[in-house]
Image: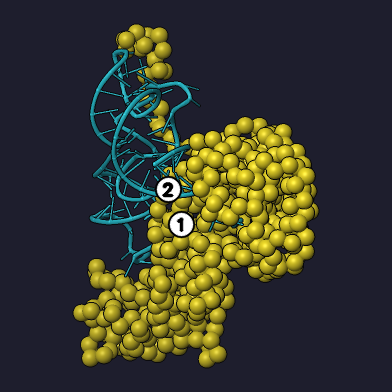
Chain colours: A yellow, B cyan
Amino acid sequence: MRVLLEKLAPDALERKKQEKSVGLKDLPGESSEVVLRFAPNPNGPLSLGHSRGVVINSEYAKMYGGKVVLRFDDTDTKVKPPIPEAYSWIEEEFEWISGRSADVVIRASDRMPVYLDYARKMIQGGHGYVCRCKSESFREFRNSKEECPCRNKSIEGNIADWDAMNEGEIEEGGAVVRVKTDMNIPNPALRDWPALRIQHKPHPMVGDRYKVWPLLDFQSAIEDHEQGVTHIIRGKDLMDSTRKQTLLYEHFGWEYPSALYWGRVKVHEYGGFSTSSIRESIDSGAKEGWDDPRLPTIKALQRRGFCSESLREFWIDLGLSQKDISIPLQTLESFNARIIDSKTERRVFVGDPREIKLQGDFPTSNLSLPRHPENPTVGNRCWMVGGPVVIQDGDIGDGVFRLKDFADVKIVDELANIESFEKSDERRKIHWLPLENSRKARLVIPDGDEIDELDGLLEDVDLVIGDVYQLERVGFARLDRFEEDLTAILIWLHG
RNA sequence: GCUCGUGUGGUGUAGUUCGGUCCAUCAUGACGGACUCUCGAUCCGUCGACCCGGGUUCAAAUCCCGGCACGAGCACCA
Protein backbone atom coordinates (compact mmCIF):
# COMPACT_ATOMS: atom_id res chain seq x y z
CA MET A 1 0.00 0.00 0.00
CA ARG A 2 2.75 2.37 0.98
CA VAL A 3 4.71 1.55 -2.15
CA LEU A 4 1.60 2.19 -4.19
CA LEU A 5 1.02 5.50 -2.53
CA GLU A 6 4.59 6.57 -3.08
CA LYS A 7 4.03 6.19 -6.77
CA LEU A 8 0.55 7.64 -7.02
CA ALA A 9 0.48 10.35 -4.42
CA PRO A 10 3.77 11.01 -2.65
CA ASP A 11 2.22 14.02 -0.93
CA ALA A 12 -0.09 11.75 1.01
CA LEU A 13 2.85 10.30 2.89
CA GLU A 14 4.16 13.61 4.13
CA ARG A 15 3.18 14.30 7.66
CA LYS A 16 1.61 17.64 8.21
CA LYS A 17 2.52 19.14 11.54
CA GLN A 18 -0.45 19.25 13.86
CA GLU A 19 -1.66 22.69 14.67
CA LYS A 20 -3.87 24.00 17.36
CA SER A 21 -6.64 26.06 15.86
CA VAL A 22 -6.59 29.60 17.13
CA GLY A 23 -9.58 31.66 18.08
CA LEU A 24 -13.16 30.61 18.55
CA LYS A 25 -14.84 27.93 16.52
CA ASP A 26 -17.45 28.86 13.96
CA LEU A 27 -20.94 29.54 15.14
CA PRO A 28 -23.54 26.97 14.11
CA GLY A 29 -26.57 27.85 12.03
CA GLU A 30 -27.31 31.00 10.10
CA SER A 31 -24.47 33.47 10.50
CA SER A 32 -25.23 36.31 8.10
CA GLU A 33 -26.79 38.62 10.65
CA VAL A 34 -25.61 37.53 14.03
CA VAL A 35 -27.21 38.99 17.13
CA LEU A 36 -25.85 37.96 20.50
CA ARG A 37 -26.65 39.01 23.99
CA PHE A 38 -25.04 39.32 27.38
CA ALA A 39 -27.59 39.39 30.17
CA PRO A 40 -26.29 40.04 33.69
CA ASN A 41 -28.30 40.78 36.78
CA PRO A 42 -27.29 44.26 37.97
CA ASN A 43 -27.14 43.13 41.58
CA GLY A 44 -23.48 44.12 41.62
CA PRO A 45 -20.62 44.95 39.26
CA LEU A 46 -19.20 42.35 36.89
CA SER A 47 -16.93 39.58 38.08
CA LEU A 48 -14.21 37.60 36.35
CA GLY A 49 -16.88 34.97 35.67
CA HIS A 50 -19.08 37.46 33.85
CA SER A 51 -16.16 38.57 31.73
CA ARG A 52 -16.32 35.24 29.92
CA GLY A 53 -19.75 36.15 28.60
CA VAL A 54 -18.61 39.61 27.60
CA VAL A 55 -15.54 38.32 25.80
CA ILE A 56 -17.13 35.37 24.00
CA ASN A 57 -20.17 37.31 22.85
CA SER A 58 -18.31 40.41 21.75
CA GLU A 59 -15.66 38.32 20.04
CA TYR A 60 -18.26 36.43 18.02
CA ALA A 61 -19.92 39.71 17.13
CA LYS A 62 -16.56 40.89 15.85
CA MET A 63 -15.99 37.68 13.88
CA TYR A 64 -19.33 37.90 12.11
CA GLY A 65 -19.86 41.64 12.01
CA GLY A 66 -22.85 41.14 14.29
CA LYS A 67 -24.32 42.91 17.28
CA VAL A 68 -24.33 42.38 21.02
CA VAL A 69 -27.29 43.28 23.17
CA LEU A 70 -26.44 44.15 26.74
CA ARG A 71 -29.57 43.28 28.65
CA PHE A 72 -30.09 43.87 32.34
CA ASP A 73 -32.12 40.98 33.72
CA ASP A 74 -33.39 42.89 36.72
CA THR A 75 -36.75 41.27 37.33
CA ASP A 76 -36.11 40.04 40.85
CA THR A 77 -36.79 42.48 43.65
CA LYS A 78 -36.47 40.08 46.57
CA VAL A 79 -33.76 37.45 46.30
CA LYS A 80 -31.18 39.25 44.15
CA PRO A 81 -32.40 42.84 43.94
CA PRO A 82 -30.59 45.16 41.57
CA ILE A 83 -28.47 48.01 42.89
CA PRO A 84 -28.96 51.27 40.99
CA GLU A 85 -25.27 52.09 40.50
CA ALA A 86 -24.57 48.71 38.95
CA TYR A 87 -26.21 49.55 35.63
CA SER A 88 -23.59 52.10 34.69
CA TRP A 89 -20.78 50.10 36.28
CA ILE A 90 -21.65 47.17 34.06
CA GLU A 91 -21.91 49.27 30.91
CA GLU A 92 -18.45 50.67 31.56
CA GLU A 93 -17.01 47.30 32.46
CA PHE A 94 -18.49 45.76 29.33
CA GLU A 95 -16.72 48.40 27.30
CA TRP A 96 -13.46 47.98 29.15
CA ILE A 97 -13.43 44.20 28.80
CA SER A 98 -14.49 43.98 25.17
CA GLY A 99 -12.88 47.18 23.94
CA ARG A 100 -16.19 48.36 22.49
CA SER A 101 -19.55 49.41 23.80
CA ALA A 102 -22.65 47.24 23.50
CA ASP A 103 -24.74 47.83 20.38
CA VAL A 104 -28.03 47.83 22.25
CA VAL A 105 -28.58 48.34 25.97
CA ILE A 106 -31.92 47.45 27.51
CA ARG A 107 -33.35 46.89 30.95
CA ALA A 108 -35.93 44.22 31.57
CA SER A 109 -37.58 46.49 34.13
CA ASP A 110 -38.22 49.03 31.36
CA ARG A 111 -39.79 46.39 29.19
CA MET A 112 -42.42 45.14 31.61
CA PRO A 113 -45.42 46.14 29.44
CA VAL A 114 -44.07 43.90 26.66
CA TYR A 115 -43.72 40.89 28.93
CA LEU A 116 -47.10 41.37 30.59
CA ASP A 117 -48.71 41.71 27.19
CA TYR A 118 -47.23 38.45 25.98
CA ALA A 119 -48.25 36.75 29.20
CA ARG A 120 -51.83 37.82 28.69
CA LYS A 121 -51.70 36.64 25.08
CA MET A 122 -50.39 33.31 26.22
CA ILE A 123 -53.23 32.89 28.67
CA GLN A 124 -55.78 33.99 26.13
CA GLY A 125 -54.43 31.52 23.63
CA GLY A 126 -54.85 28.74 26.17
CA HIS A 127 -51.11 28.13 26.38
CA GLY A 128 -50.75 29.23 29.95
CA TYR A 129 -52.78 29.39 33.12
CA VAL A 130 -52.83 30.99 36.54
CA CYS A 131 -51.98 28.38 39.13
CA ARG A 132 -53.15 29.00 42.68
CA CYS A 133 -51.52 25.89 44.12
CA LYS A 134 -48.89 26.22 46.79
CA SER A 135 -45.45 25.54 45.42
CA GLU A 136 -45.09 22.40 47.54
CA SER A 137 -48.33 20.89 46.31
CA PHE A 138 -47.51 21.65 42.72
CA ARG A 139 -44.19 19.92 43.21
CA GLU A 140 -46.08 16.78 44.14
CA PHE A 141 -48.25 17.02 41.06
CA ARG A 142 -45.20 17.51 38.94
CA ASN A 143 -43.38 14.57 40.39
CA SER A 144 -46.37 12.25 39.98
CA LYS A 145 -47.11 13.59 36.48
CA GLU A 146 -50.59 14.69 37.57
CA GLU A 147 -52.28 17.82 36.35
CA CYS A 148 -53.00 20.40 39.00
CA PRO A 149 -56.65 21.53 39.42
CA CYS A 150 -55.90 25.00 38.03
CA ARG A 151 -54.80 23.59 34.71
CA ASN A 152 -58.24 23.13 33.26
CA LYS A 153 -59.71 26.39 34.39
CA SER A 154 -61.55 28.32 31.66
CA ILE A 155 -59.74 31.03 29.79
CA GLU A 156 -62.14 33.59 31.29
CA GLY A 157 -61.33 32.33 34.77
CA ASN A 158 -57.64 32.57 34.06
CA ILE A 159 -57.95 36.11 32.75
CA ALA A 160 -59.89 37.09 35.86
CA ASP A 161 -57.14 35.64 38.04
CA TRP A 162 -54.50 37.31 35.89
CA ASP A 163 -56.17 40.69 36.35
CA ALA A 164 -56.43 40.10 40.07
CA MET A 165 -52.72 39.34 40.22
CA ASN A 166 -51.90 42.56 38.43
CA GLU A 167 -54.27 44.59 40.57
CA GLY A 168 -52.36 43.49 43.61
CA GLU A 169 -55.32 41.57 44.96
CA ILE A 170 -53.37 38.39 45.42
CA GLU A 171 -50.56 38.16 47.94
CA GLU A 172 -47.02 37.12 47.05
CA GLY A 173 -46.92 33.35 46.68
CA GLY A 174 -50.66 33.21 46.12
CA ALA A 175 -50.52 32.63 42.40
CA VAL A 176 -48.16 32.03 39.53
CA VAL A 177 -48.58 31.90 35.76
CA ARG A 178 -47.53 28.60 34.25
CA VAL A 179 -46.72 27.68 30.68
CA LYS A 180 -48.81 24.69 29.64
CA THR A 181 -46.47 22.00 28.40
CA ASP A 182 -47.20 18.35 29.17
CA MET A 183 -47.17 16.69 32.58
CA ASN A 184 -45.79 13.52 30.98
CA ILE A 185 -42.57 15.02 29.69
CA PRO A 186 -39.76 12.79 31.00
CA ASN A 187 -37.80 15.74 32.34
CA PRO A 188 -39.67 16.97 35.41
CA ALA A 189 -38.17 20.43 35.10
CA LEU A 190 -40.15 21.09 31.92
CA ARG A 191 -43.61 20.16 33.21
CA ASP A 192 -45.83 23.26 33.27
CA TRP A 193 -43.00 25.53 34.30
CA PRO A 194 -43.62 28.85 36.05
CA ALA A 195 -43.37 31.97 33.91
CA LEU A 196 -44.44 34.87 36.12
CA ARG A 197 -44.88 35.39 39.81
CA ILE A 198 -46.15 38.06 42.20
CA GLN A 199 -43.73 40.47 43.83
CA HIS A 200 -45.06 43.30 45.92
CA LYS A 201 -41.68 44.55 47.00
CA PRO A 202 -40.94 47.74 45.04
CA HIS A 203 -38.31 47.63 42.33
CA PRO A 204 -35.37 50.01 42.89
CA MET A 205 -35.74 51.49 39.41
CA VAL A 206 -39.43 51.37 38.57
CA GLY A 207 -41.02 51.33 42.00
CA ASP A 208 -44.25 49.53 42.80
CA ARG A 209 -45.92 49.97 39.43
CA TYR A 210 -45.94 46.24 38.72
CA LYS A 211 -47.24 43.49 40.97
CA VAL A 212 -46.48 40.62 38.59
CA TRP A 213 -42.96 40.01 37.38
CA PRO A 214 -41.67 37.48 34.84
CA LEU A 215 -39.20 34.80 35.84
CA LEU A 216 -35.95 34.49 33.89
CA ASP A 217 -37.10 31.74 31.53
CA PHE A 218 -40.08 33.77 30.35
CA GLN A 219 -38.58 37.23 30.28
CA SER A 220 -35.43 36.07 28.56
CA ALA A 221 -37.32 34.03 25.96
CA ILE A 222 -39.58 36.93 25.04
CA GLU A 223 -36.77 39.45 24.91
CA ASP A 224 -34.48 37.24 22.85
CA HIS A 225 -37.25 37.04 20.28
CA GLU A 226 -37.98 40.76 20.43
CA GLN A 227 -34.32 41.62 19.87
CA GLY A 228 -33.87 39.11 17.09
CA VAL A 229 -31.19 37.19 18.94
CA THR A 230 -29.73 34.48 16.70
CA HIS A 231 -27.31 32.79 19.08
CA ILE A 232 -27.55 32.31 22.81
CA ILE A 233 -24.35 31.47 24.59
CA ARG A 234 -24.70 30.56 28.24
CA GLY A 235 -23.72 28.23 31.02
CA LYS A 236 -24.73 24.60 30.71
CA ASP A 237 -26.72 24.93 33.91
CA LEU A 238 -29.22 26.69 31.66
CA MET A 239 -29.71 23.79 29.29
CA ASP A 240 -33.14 23.09 30.70
CA SER A 241 -33.92 26.75 30.19
CA THR A 242 -33.41 26.24 26.48
CA ARG A 243 -35.82 23.33 26.50
CA LYS A 244 -38.43 25.24 28.49
CA GLN A 245 -38.14 28.24 26.24
CA THR A 246 -38.34 26.12 23.10
CA LEU A 247 -41.73 24.87 24.30
CA LEU A 248 -42.84 28.47 24.81
CA TYR A 249 -41.61 29.41 21.34
CA GLU A 250 -43.75 26.62 19.92
CA HIS A 251 -46.82 28.21 21.48
CA PHE A 252 -46.01 31.51 19.83
CA GLY A 253 -44.88 29.92 16.58
CA TRP A 254 -41.38 31.32 16.82
CA GLU A 255 -38.07 29.76 15.94
CA TYR A 256 -35.64 29.31 18.79
CA PRO A 257 -32.09 30.69 18.37
CA SER A 258 -29.04 28.42 18.29
CA ALA A 259 -27.83 27.71 21.79
CA LEU A 260 -24.25 27.11 22.88
CA TYR A 261 -23.03 26.29 26.34
CA TRP A 262 -19.96 26.48 28.49
CA GLY A 263 -19.15 24.55 31.64
CA ARG A 264 -18.50 25.91 35.08
CA VAL A 265 -15.18 27.61 35.70
CA LYS A 266 -13.45 27.81 39.02
CA VAL A 267 -10.33 29.84 39.57
CA HIS A 268 -8.36 28.15 42.26
CA GLU A 269 -7.46 31.33 44.12
CA TYR A 270 -11.05 32.52 44.38
CA GLY A 271 -13.86 30.82 46.26
CA GLY A 272 -16.43 31.58 43.59
CA PHE A 273 -17.88 34.31 41.45
CA SER A 274 -21.26 34.63 43.13
CA THR A 275 -22.24 38.29 43.20
CA SER A 276 -24.49 37.79 46.19
CA SER A 277 -21.79 36.23 48.30
CA ILE A 278 -19.32 38.93 47.30
CA ARG A 279 -21.88 41.50 48.35
CA GLU A 280 -22.31 39.71 51.64
CA SER A 281 -18.60 39.76 52.31
CA ILE A 282 -18.57 43.51 51.72
CA ASP A 283 -21.63 44.18 53.85
CA SER A 284 -20.17 42.16 56.71
CA GLY A 285 -16.96 44.18 56.55
CA ALA A 286 -14.80 41.22 55.60
CA LYS A 287 -13.91 43.03 52.37
CA GLU A 288 -13.34 46.76 51.85
CA GLY A 289 -15.52 47.20 48.78
CA TRP A 290 -16.19 45.91 45.29
CA ASP A 291 -12.58 46.69 44.33
CA ASP A 292 -10.98 44.94 47.28
CA PRO A 293 -7.91 43.33 45.67
CA ARG A 294 -8.83 39.93 47.09
CA LEU A 295 -12.09 39.86 45.15
CA PRO A 296 -12.67 38.33 41.70
CA THR A 297 -14.45 41.44 40.49
CA ILE A 298 -13.48 43.35 37.37
CA LYS A 299 -13.02 46.40 39.58
CA ALA A 300 -10.46 44.54 41.67
CA LEU A 301 -8.68 43.17 38.63
CA GLN A 302 -8.46 46.69 37.18
CA ARG A 303 -7.19 48.03 40.45
CA ARG A 304 -4.49 45.40 40.53
CA GLY A 305 -3.37 46.25 37.02
CA PHE A 306 -4.71 43.51 34.78
CA CYS A 307 -5.24 44.61 31.22
CA SER A 308 -8.39 43.75 29.35
CA GLU A 309 -6.49 42.18 26.50
CA SER A 310 -5.28 39.43 28.80
CA LEU A 311 -8.86 38.69 29.82
CA ARG A 312 -9.85 38.41 26.20
CA GLU A 313 -6.96 36.11 25.31
CA PHE A 314 -7.59 34.02 28.39
CA TRP A 315 -11.26 33.33 27.63
CA ILE A 316 -10.74 32.86 23.91
CA ASP A 317 -8.03 30.33 24.65
CA LEU A 318 -10.40 28.45 26.95
CA GLY A 319 -13.06 28.44 24.25
CA LEU A 320 -16.56 27.09 24.64
CA SER A 321 -15.93 23.69 26.17
CA GLN A 322 -18.75 22.23 28.24
CA LYS A 323 -16.24 20.71 30.62
CA ASP A 324 -16.22 21.97 34.16
CA ILE A 325 -12.79 23.32 34.73
CA SER A 326 -10.66 24.55 37.58
CA ILE A 327 -7.85 26.77 36.50
CA PRO A 328 -5.10 28.55 38.41
CA LEU A 329 -5.06 32.34 38.31
CA GLN A 330 -1.49 31.93 37.12
CA THR A 331 -2.77 31.17 33.65
CA LEU A 332 -4.40 34.59 33.41
CA GLU A 333 -1.34 36.14 35.03
CA SER A 334 0.97 34.70 32.43
CA PHE A 335 -1.16 36.22 29.65
CA ASN A 336 -1.05 39.52 31.48
CA ALA A 337 2.66 39.42 32.18
CA ARG A 338 3.47 38.73 28.55
CA ILE A 339 1.30 41.63 27.38
CA ILE A 340 2.36 44.28 29.87
CA ASP A 341 6.02 43.41 30.25
CA SER A 342 7.21 45.37 27.23
CA LYS A 343 5.50 48.58 28.31
CA THR A 344 6.09 48.40 32.02
CA GLU A 345 8.87 50.53 33.44
CA ARG A 346 11.25 49.13 36.01
CA ARG A 347 11.58 50.46 39.52
CA VAL A 348 13.25 49.15 42.63
CA PHE A 349 11.33 48.27 45.75
CA VAL A 350 13.33 47.21 48.76
CA GLY A 351 11.15 45.42 51.25
CA ASP A 352 12.27 45.04 54.82
CA PRO A 353 15.13 47.49 54.12
CA ARG A 354 18.53 47.49 55.75
CA GLU A 355 20.81 50.45 55.43
CA ILE A 356 24.45 50.02 54.50
CA LYS A 357 27.25 52.40 53.67
CA LEU A 358 29.38 52.03 50.62
CA GLN A 359 33.12 52.16 51.01
CA GLY A 360 35.63 52.37 48.28
CA ASP A 361 37.16 54.55 45.71
CA PHE A 362 34.41 56.06 43.63
CA PRO A 363 33.21 59.55 42.87
CA THR A 364 29.83 60.74 44.09
CA SER A 365 27.87 60.78 40.88
CA ASN A 366 24.76 59.94 38.94
CA LEU A 367 24.00 56.39 38.01
CA SER A 368 21.86 56.15 34.92
CA LEU A 369 19.67 53.07 34.52
CA PRO A 370 17.25 52.18 31.77
CA ARG A 371 13.56 52.53 32.55
CA HIS A 372 13.09 49.39 30.49
CA PRO A 373 15.92 47.00 29.57
CA GLU A 374 14.65 46.27 26.06
CA ASN A 375 13.11 49.59 25.21
CA PRO A 376 15.67 52.40 25.29
CA THR A 377 13.22 54.94 23.86
CA VAL A 378 11.52 55.42 27.21
CA GLY A 379 14.75 56.79 28.58
CA ASN A 380 16.65 56.41 31.79
CA ARG A 381 16.24 56.88 35.48
CA CYS A 382 18.93 58.61 37.54
CA TRP A 383 20.24 57.74 40.95
CA MET A 384 22.65 59.72 43.11
CA VAL A 385 25.31 57.38 44.34
CA GLY A 386 27.43 58.44 47.23
CA GLY A 387 25.29 58.34 50.31
CA PRO A 388 23.95 55.33 52.18
CA VAL A 389 22.00 52.66 50.29
CA VAL A 390 19.43 50.09 51.31
CA ILE A 391 19.15 46.43 50.50
CA GLN A 392 16.60 43.84 51.52
CA ASP A 393 17.55 42.44 54.90
CA GLY A 394 17.15 38.85 53.74
CA ASP A 395 19.64 39.42 50.93
CA ILE A 396 22.60 39.93 53.26
CA GLY A 397 23.54 36.26 53.42
CA ASP A 398 27.29 35.81 53.55
CA GLY A 399 27.78 39.45 52.69
CA VAL A 400 29.16 38.83 49.23
CA PHE A 401 26.98 39.95 46.33
CA ARG A 402 26.69 42.29 43.42
CA LEU A 403 24.60 45.42 43.62
CA LYS A 404 22.77 45.03 40.34
CA ASP A 405 24.07 47.31 37.57
CA PHE A 406 26.65 48.84 39.88
CA ALA A 407 29.34 46.98 41.75
CA ASP A 408 30.53 43.80 43.39
CA VAL A 409 30.72 44.34 47.13
CA LYS A 410 31.63 42.53 50.29
CA ILE A 411 30.17 43.48 53.65
CA VAL A 412 32.73 44.01 56.37
CA ASP A 413 31.67 45.54 59.68
CA GLU A 414 28.45 47.03 58.29
CA LEU A 415 30.39 48.62 55.46
CA ALA A 416 30.04 47.54 51.86
CA ASN A 417 33.47 47.42 50.37
CA ILE A 418 33.43 47.86 46.65
CA GLU A 419 35.57 45.17 45.14
CA SER A 420 34.90 45.81 41.48
CA PHE A 421 32.58 47.76 39.25
CA GLU A 422 32.80 45.09 36.58
CA LYS A 423 31.05 41.81 37.22
CA SER A 424 33.98 39.75 38.37
CA ASP A 425 32.45 36.42 39.30
CA GLU A 426 29.24 34.43 39.75
CA ARG A 427 28.15 36.06 42.99
CA ARG A 428 24.44 36.75 43.57
CA LYS A 429 22.91 39.85 42.07
CA ILE A 430 20.63 41.75 44.36
CA HIS A 431 18.54 44.88 44.00
CA TRP A 432 19.35 47.97 46.03
CA LEU A 433 18.53 51.64 46.25
CA PRO A 434 20.27 54.85 47.33
CA LEU A 435 18.46 56.22 50.36
CA GLU A 436 18.42 59.57 48.66
CA ASN A 437 16.29 58.31 45.77
CA SER A 438 13.77 56.45 47.90
CA ARG A 439 10.43 57.09 49.50
CA LYS A 440 8.42 55.08 51.98
CA ALA A 441 6.20 52.51 50.41
CA ARG A 442 3.96 49.60 51.27
CA LEU A 443 3.35 46.61 49.04
CA VAL A 444 -0.14 45.20 49.54
CA ILE A 445 -0.34 41.54 48.60
CA PRO A 446 -3.72 39.81 48.37
CA ASP A 447 -3.42 36.21 49.48
CA GLY A 448 -6.68 34.31 49.49
CA ASP A 449 -8.83 35.89 52.17
CA GLU A 450 -5.85 37.60 53.70
CA ILE A 451 -3.95 40.74 52.88
CA ASP A 452 -0.21 40.74 53.44
CA GLU A 453 1.60 44.03 53.72
CA LEU A 454 5.27 44.55 53.18
CA ASP A 455 6.79 47.86 54.20
CA GLY A 456 9.82 49.11 52.40
CA LEU A 457 11.33 51.79 50.24
CA LEU A 458 10.40 52.52 46.65
CA GLU A 459 12.57 54.17 44.04
CA ASP A 460 11.18 57.69 43.85
CA VAL A 461 11.41 58.42 40.15
CA ASP A 462 8.42 59.74 38.18
CA LEU A 463 5.80 57.75 40.03
CA VAL A 464 2.35 58.02 38.50
CA ILE A 465 -0.73 56.82 40.32
CA GLY A 466 -2.44 54.08 38.35
CA ASP A 467 0.70 52.95 36.55
CA VAL A 468 1.99 49.42 36.76
CA TYR A 469 5.71 48.94 37.45
CA GLN A 470 7.90 45.95 37.44
CA LEU A 471 9.69 45.92 40.75
CA GLU A 472 13.01 44.34 39.93
CA ARG A 473 13.41 40.86 41.37
CA VAL A 474 9.99 41.18 43.01
CA GLY A 475 7.28 41.31 40.39
CA PHE A 476 4.62 43.55 38.93
CA ALA A 477 2.63 45.97 41.07
CA ARG A 478 0.33 48.91 40.48
CA LEU A 479 0.71 52.23 42.28
CA ASP A 480 -2.66 52.65 43.96
CA ARG A 481 -2.27 55.92 45.89
CA PHE A 482 -0.15 58.01 48.21
CA GLU A 483 -1.02 58.14 51.88
CA GLU A 484 -1.12 61.44 53.71
CA ASP A 485 2.47 60.98 54.88
CA LEU A 486 3.35 60.38 51.19
CA THR A 487 3.89 56.66 51.63
CA ALA A 488 3.35 55.00 48.27
CA ILE A 489 0.80 52.20 48.34
CA LEU A 490 1.52 49.48 45.78
CA ILE A 491 -0.86 46.65 45.04
CA TRP A 492 0.71 43.41 44.02
CA LEU A 493 -0.21 42.17 40.56
CA HIS A 494 1.82 39.05 39.86
CA GLY A 495 5.35 37.77 39.40
C1' G B 1 -35.02 9.30 42.24
C1' C B 2 -36.02 11.56 37.27
C1' U B 3 -33.69 14.41 33.28
C1' C B 4 -29.56 16.46 30.80
C1' G B 5 -24.39 17.02 29.95
C1' U B 6 -18.98 16.09 30.13
C1' G B 7 -14.49 12.73 30.37
C1' U B 8 -7.22 14.08 25.98
C1' G B 9 -0.27 15.20 30.00
C1' G B 10 0.01 18.58 36.73
C1' U B 11 -3.53 22.60 34.71
C1' G B 12 -6.12 24.26 30.40
C1' U B 13 -6.70 23.32 25.17
C1' A B 14 -6.62 21.41 19.50
C1' G B 15 -8.17 17.15 17.00
C1' U B 16 -14.08 13.70 17.56
C1' U B 17 -19.11 16.30 12.78
C1' C B 18 -17.19 12.76 7.83
C1' G B 19 -12.13 6.56 11.28
C1' G B 20 -6.26 6.71 8.23
C1' U B 21 -2.56 12.98 6.97
C1' C B 22 -2.38 11.78 15.27
C1' C B 23 4.17 7.31 17.49
C1' A B 24 -1.85 13.22 19.25
C1' U B 25 -1.57 20.40 18.87
C1' C B 26 -0.58 24.71 21.50
C1' A B 27 -0.21 27.29 26.01
C1' U B 28 0.85 27.14 31.02
C1' G B 29 3.73 24.49 34.71
C1' A B 30 8.01 21.82 36.66
C1' C B 31 13.16 20.77 35.87
C1' G B 32 17.92 21.85 33.40
C1' G B 33 20.82 25.07 30.32
C1' A B 34 22.29 29.73 27.42
C1' C B 35 22.51 35.18 27.88
C1' U B 36 28.21 38.94 33.17
C1' C B 37 19.87 42.45 30.45
C1' U B 38 16.38 40.50 37.47
C1' C B 39 13.62 35.26 41.12
C1' G B 40 11.48 39.41 34.85
C1' A B 41 12.07 38.87 29.34
C1' U B 42 14.22 36.09 25.30
C1' C B 43 16.36 31.47 23.40
C1' C B 44 17.35 26.03 23.77
C1' G B 45 16.37 21.27 25.92
C1' U B 46 13.69 17.67 29.10
C1' C B 47 9.05 15.72 31.49
C1' G B 48 4.05 14.38 30.73
C1' A B 49 -2.37 12.49 28.24
C1' C B 50 -6.68 9.97 24.62
C1' C B 51 -11.77 7.39 31.88
C1' C B 52 -12.34 1.68 31.88
C1' G B 53 -13.93 -2.89 29.32
C1' G B 54 -15.74 -5.11 25.05
C1' G B 55 -17.16 -4.75 19.72
C1' U B 56 -16.90 -3.20 14.31
C1' U B 57 -12.59 -2.43 10.94
C1' C B 58 -6.82 -3.54 7.15
C1' A B 59 -7.05 0.90 10.50
C1' A B 60 -10.39 3.81 16.49
C1' A B 61 -8.94 9.75 20.62
C1' U B 62 -12.71 9.62 16.60
C1' C B 63 -18.05 4.74 15.24
C1' C B 64 -21.25 1.03 18.40
C1' C B 65 -22.47 -1.40 23.21
C1' G B 66 -21.74 -1.70 28.48
C1' G B 67 -19.58 0.27 32.80
C1' C B 68 -17.32 4.07 35.89
C1' A B 69 -16.38 9.06 37.39
C1' C B 70 -17.64 14.05 37.65
C1' G B 71 -21.02 18.18 36.97
C1' A B 72 -25.79 20.52 36.29
C1' G B 73 -31.30 21.07 36.36
C1' C B 74 -35.88 19.38 38.75
C1' A B 75 -36.67 27.63 42.81
C1' C B 76 -42.88 31.78 43.06
C1' C B 77 -33.23 33.23 41.91
C1' A B 78 -30.57 34.93 37.74
Q: How many marks?
A: 2
Q: Is residue A326 left or right of residue A281?
A: left
Q: Is residue A89 shown to the viewer in this render? A: no
Name the residue located 39 percent from the left edge and 80 percent from the top edge. A454
> Image quadrant for the C terminus of chain A?
bottom left
Reply above or below: A282 against B65: below
**Residue A50, disc:** none
Q: Mark 1: few, some, or many residues within 10 Å (few <14, many ≥20)?
A: some
Q: Which residue is mark 2?
A: A324
Q: CA distance from mark 2 to mark 1?
A: 17 Å
Could you say which quadrant of the image residue A6 lies in?
Answer: top left
Q: Is residue A399 shown to the viewer in this render? A: yes
Where does residue A380 sit, x and y in percent of width and height? 51, 72
Where does residue A165 sit, x and y in percent of width and height? 73, 57
Q: Is residue A226 left or right of residue A465?
A: right
Query: Circle 1 — which element?
Result: helix
Amino acid type at mark 1: Leu
Name the residue located 70 percent from the left edge and 43 percent from the top edge. A153
Where does residue A279 sit, x and y in percent of width and height? 54, 70
Along the line of sight, the residue nearer the viewer: B32 or A441: A441
Amino acid type at mark 2: Asp
Along the line of sight, the residue nearer the viewer: A209 or A371: A209
Along the line of sight, the residue nearer the viewer: A435 or A102: A102
Q: Are marks 2 and 1 in contact (CB under 8 Å)?
A: no
Could you say which quadrant of the image residue A359 lies in?
Answer: bottom left
Where does residue A266 sit, x and y in percent of width and height? 43, 56
Q: Mark 2: few, some, or many residues within 10 Å (few <14, many ≥20)?
A: few
Earlier sequence position, callout 2 versus callout 1: 2
Q: Chain of mark 2?
A: A
Name the residue located 49 percent from the left edge and 64 percent from the top edge. A296
Q: Which residue is mark 1?
A: A332
